[in-house]
């Protein structure tokens, strides 16, 4: 099949492009700055229709991942760019699909598990989960993120595309050993003895192993599900436990805990936000599980061990198709 991935040059896009390419599918990444890759990389500007729509016309699947990274300070300019880059590119992808003579059968649109409320009491699924924004204890920056997520999904819902099934990927943090990814950054903290709990450590961490992420994307291409789908392992766990398992998997017994004020200070100097680490993201994949999807890495303990093993050995994941 042919898969087009706008914004596919980043962490998640590289995981997907690598897997599709390895499994023999045709991949076209749309990038504002195409770099040499084993798959096709086509220029777009993320703002206007152009020659790139030829990639969409006749494709089977579009996976739109484009959007300015949220790993930054939420000042006014960054907020604007986080929001606009998501809405503009999503609308643009919708226009390209609407204009296609042979539109793709499936549009998988990135969203985020951050759309759900900060909570400890119960997990958020697609049916009974509470969307964020109204939590009394949530700072304004957290509300900004949920507002972005809601607007992002609404932008994907806008166009009427009778021939294209739309799926909104409410993804948790995708864990892969790739340099610069979230797992790499957490493991680096563990390696230097800073891998203790963050804040009070009660906040839930939702995560998904890259192999399950790829398998779930294949699943969503092949099934008939549409609308929001949580892409997260079925067992989110409190940050203190999450970090303990990661330390164990790497073979380090202890990690310095970081208090909230240390994180606030650290986030300021690292030009990021504490939301990424302190918000309780308790998200479970109800729709995938009810549809019959089975996770290869449902528990963090095994996922962390496998990822750490691969960091040590420098190996790539096995093919999702061969292992499905
Ligand atoms: N990583 C995760 O675990 C995770 C979890 C939940 C949700 N998500 C969401 O999933 C998507 C992909 O995640 P990721 O980690 O792969 O993100 P990423 O590494 O930041 O990649 C996103 C890509 O979007 C493109 N982009 C950035 N600003 C843009 C703009 N103004 N206009 C058009 N394109 C722009 C960039 O491609 P070029 O520079 O090549 O154009 C970039 O490589 C993101 O939207 C993210 O919010 C990710």
Image (cartoon, grey):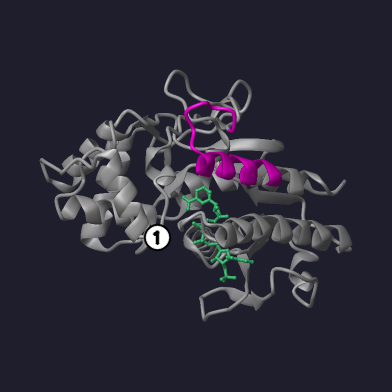
Q: What residue do we see at 54% from left, 33% from top?
A: 293
75 horizontally vs 63: left or right: left
SS assignment for the magenta stretch, majority: helix
**Where is residue 159 shown, x and y percent of the image?**
84, 49
Q: What residue do we see at 51% from left, 40% from top?
A: 142
Tell me which image quadrant ligand 1 sits in: bottom right
Q: Secondary structure at mark 1?
A: loop
Check if residue 150 falls in the magenta segment. Answer: yes
The answer to whether the residue bearing label 1 lies less than 8 angstroms from the nearest atom of ligand 1 is no
Asked whether 290 or 160 is in front, the reply is: 160
- The answer to which image quadrant residue 300 occupies is top left
Q: Is residue 154 above or below residue 124?
A: below
Q: Is residue 151 above or below residue 47?
A: above
Asked whether 67 or 178 is in front, the reply is: 67
- The answer to which image quadrant residue 169 occupies is top right
Q: Is residue 308 above or below residue 29?
A: above
Check if residue 143 falls in the magenta segment. Answer: yes
Q: What residue do we see at 49% from left, 46% from top?
A: 213
- The segment highlighted magenta reads 133-151
**Where is residue 258 shown, x and y percent of the image?**
23, 42
Q: Quadrant of the N terminus?
A: bottom right
Q: From this viewpoint, is residue 309 visible?
A: no
50 horizontally vs 150: left or right: right
**Where is residue 5 shown, x and y percent of the image?**
63, 62
**Where is residue 217 shown, x and y percent of the image?**
57, 47
33 horizontally vs 59: left or right: left
| Residue at numbered disc 1 | 271
Q: From this viewpoint, is residue 246 visible?
A: yes
Asked whether 134 or 65 is in front, the reply is: 134
Count of marks overlaid on the render = 1
């Amino acid at each position: 099949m042919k898969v087009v991935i706008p914004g596919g040059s980043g962490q998640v896009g590289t995981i997907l492009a690598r897997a599709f390419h390895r499994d023999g599918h045709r991949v076209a990444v749309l990038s504002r700055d195409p770099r040499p890759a084993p798959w096709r990389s086509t220029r777009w500007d993320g703002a206007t229709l152009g020659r790139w729509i030829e990639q969409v016309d006749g494709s089977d699947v579009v996976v739109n991942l484009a959007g300015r990274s949220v790993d930054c300070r939420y000042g006014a300019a960054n907020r604007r760019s986080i929001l606009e880059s998501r809405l503009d590119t999503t609308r643009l992808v919708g226009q390209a699909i609407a204009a296609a003579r042979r539109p793709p059968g499936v549009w998988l649109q990135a969203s985020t598990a951050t759309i759900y409320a900060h909570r400890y009491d119960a997990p958020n699924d697609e049916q009974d989960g509470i969307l964020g924004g109204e939590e009394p204890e949530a700072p304004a920056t957290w509300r900004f993120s949920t507002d972005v997520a809601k607007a992002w999904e609404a932008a994907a819902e806008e166009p009427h595309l009778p021939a294209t099934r739309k799926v909104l990927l409410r993804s948790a943090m995708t864990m892969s050993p790739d340099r610069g990814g979230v797992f790499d950054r957490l493991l680096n903290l563990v390696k230097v003895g800073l891998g203790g709990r963050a804040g009070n450590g009660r906040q839930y961490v939702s995560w998904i192993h890259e192999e399950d992420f790829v398998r779930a994307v294949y699943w969503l291409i092949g099934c008939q599900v549409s609308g929001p789908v949580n892409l997260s392992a079925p067992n989110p766990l409190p940050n203190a436990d999450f970090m303990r398992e990661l330390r164990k998997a790497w073979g380090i017994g202890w990690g310095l805990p970081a208090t909230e004020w240390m994180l606030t200070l650290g986030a300021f100097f690292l030009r990021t936000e504490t939301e990424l680490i302190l918000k309780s993201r308790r998200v479970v994949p109800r729709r995938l599980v009810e549809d019959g999807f089975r996770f290869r890495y449902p528990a963090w303990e095994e996922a962390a061990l496998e990822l750490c093993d691969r960091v040590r050995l420098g190996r790539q994941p096995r093919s999702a198709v061969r292992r499905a």
